[in-house]
Image (cartoon, rainbow, N blue to C red):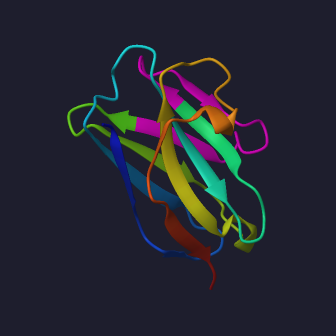
């Protein structure tokens, strides 16, 4: 069974870049047809799909976050990474990595099969 674990700093200052890593076990991030996404949930709000990296390395981003978001991977370490630049307090959220076995409709959050436990990130000076 695929397991995902997010890691990174819990506190980021405004205007800085948020950097998170998702370590995957029990499966390879290069497995054909799999999509690996970053999803966040601000306090009191719903889940928001941020972007994804597919099994072949292709990247996809939410239009609302595309200008500030970068998703990459390290196939040797079986990890994916998220960078979100120019953060504000509105970027405070629990950040999740998740995966599903299709690259169709990546923004449909209900279709993700496996999730990490999430990591809290607070943006504050």
Specify the quadrant of the image occupied by residue 7.
bottom left
Residue plotted at (42% across, 46% down): 81
Residue plotted at (66% across, 39% down): 109
Left or right of 55: which side holds 83?
right
Image quadrant containing the C terminus = bottom right
Specify the quadrant of the image occupied by residue 45.
bottom right
Specify the quadrant of the image occupied by residue 62.
top right
Q: Position of residue 5 (x, y in %)?
A: 36, 54
Left or right of 27: which side holds 88?
right
Image quadrant containing the N terminus = top left
| Residue extending furthest toward the bottom | 125
| Residue extending furthest toward the left | 76
Residue plotted at (61% across, 37% down): 51
* Number of numbered markers: 0
Left or right of 90: which side holds 14?
left
Left or right of 79: which side holds 109?
right
Q: Position of residue 122 (x, y in %)?
A: 59, 75
Residue plotted at (66% across, 61% down): 86
Q: Position of residue 40 (x, y in %)?
A: 63, 55
Q: Is residue 27 above or below residue 70?
A: above
Q: Position of residue 97 (x, y in %)?
A: 49, 47
Q: Is residue 44 above or below residue 52?
A: below
Q: Is residue 21 above or below residue 35?
A: below
66 falls in the magenta region: yes
Range shown magenta: 53-72
59 or 120: nearer the viewer: 120
102 or 71: nearer the viewer: 102
């Amino acid at each position: 069974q695929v397991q995902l674990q997010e890691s990174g700093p819990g506190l980021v200052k405004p205007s800085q870049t948020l950097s998170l890593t998702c370590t995957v076990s029990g499966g390879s991030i290069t497995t054909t047809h799999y999509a690996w996404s970053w999803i966040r949930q601000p306090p009191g709000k719903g889940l928001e799909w941020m972007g994804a990296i597919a099994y072949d390395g292709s990247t996809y981003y939410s239009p609302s976050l595309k200008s500030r978001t970068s998703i990459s991977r390290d196939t040797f370490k079986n990890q994916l990474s998220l960078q979100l630049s120019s953060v504000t307090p509105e970027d405070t959220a629990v950040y999740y990595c998740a995966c599903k076995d299709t690259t169709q409709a990546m923004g449909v959050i209900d279709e993700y099969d496996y999730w990490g436990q999430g990591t809290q990130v607070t943006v504050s000076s």
